[in-house]
Image (cartoon, rainbow, N blue to C red):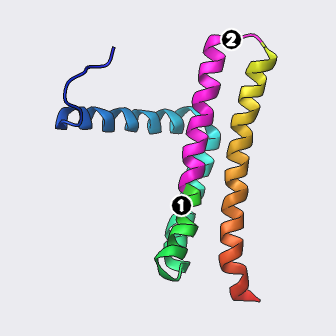
Amino acid sequence: MPGSGFRGNPRQLWNAFRWSMKGLQAGWRHEASFRLEAMLAVVLVPLGLWLGNGALEKIALVLPAVLVLSGELLNSAIEAVVDKVSPEFHELAGRAKDMGSAAVFLLLVFTMLCWGLILVPRWI
């Protein structure tokens, strides 16, 4: 059971940070898609900060890349739990994995849409 004491003390915050870093490490180490999307984010985030005119455009160019990474980590977590609970094929397990993958796909489409809506009018 989680502790019922005061939340947010420095030790708990430090532990939460360490666990988050462990999650990022696991994503990098075990998920090829996460590594690919992280490398894409390394390009897109600075490029978005450079190309965006004003704070809102910068956010609209950078945020989707961060959302893709978050979605990929959640998808990987779903896949890991499904594989742990049910190593043999089950229709619901397959559906959960497919829906997680679809969520990442939609975030990638959203990324392209944001970049297109902001940058294409500049070239036309």
The crowding category of the residue bearing disc 1, from other C-alpha atoms within 10 Å (few below 14, some 14 to 19, many at least 20), is some
In the image shown, does 7 or 119 lie closer to the viewer? 7
Q: Quadrant of the N terminus?
A: top left
Question: Is residue 64 left or right of 19 when viewed as pictured?
Answer: right
Whole-number angstrom distance, CA of label 2 to CA of label 1: 34 Å
Q: Position of residue 46 (x, y in %)?
A: 49, 69
Dividing the picture into quadrants, the one containing residue 90 is: top right
Question: Is residue 115 left or right of 45 when viewed as pictured?
Answer: right
Q: Position of residue 91 (x, y in %)?
A: 81, 18
**Residue 99 within the segment the image draws in magenta:** no
Q: What number is the disc on residue 63?
A: 1
Question: Is residue 25 left or right of 11 when viewed as pictured?
Answer: right
For label 2, the SS is loop
For label 1, the SS is helix
Specify which label sits upstream in the sequence, 2 or 1.
1
Q: What number is the disc on residue 86?
A: 2
Dividing the picture into quadrants, the one containing residue 4 is: top left
**Residue 74 within the segment the image draws in magenta:** yes
- Residue name at image x 52 percent, y 59 percent: 42
Amino acid at dot 2: Ser
| Residue segment shown in magenta | 66-88
Vertical relation: 2 (above or below) 26: above
Vertical relation: 89 (above or below) 25: above
Q: Quadrant of the C terminus?
A: bottom right
Amino acid at dot 1: Leu
- Residue name at image x 61 percent, y 14 percent: 84
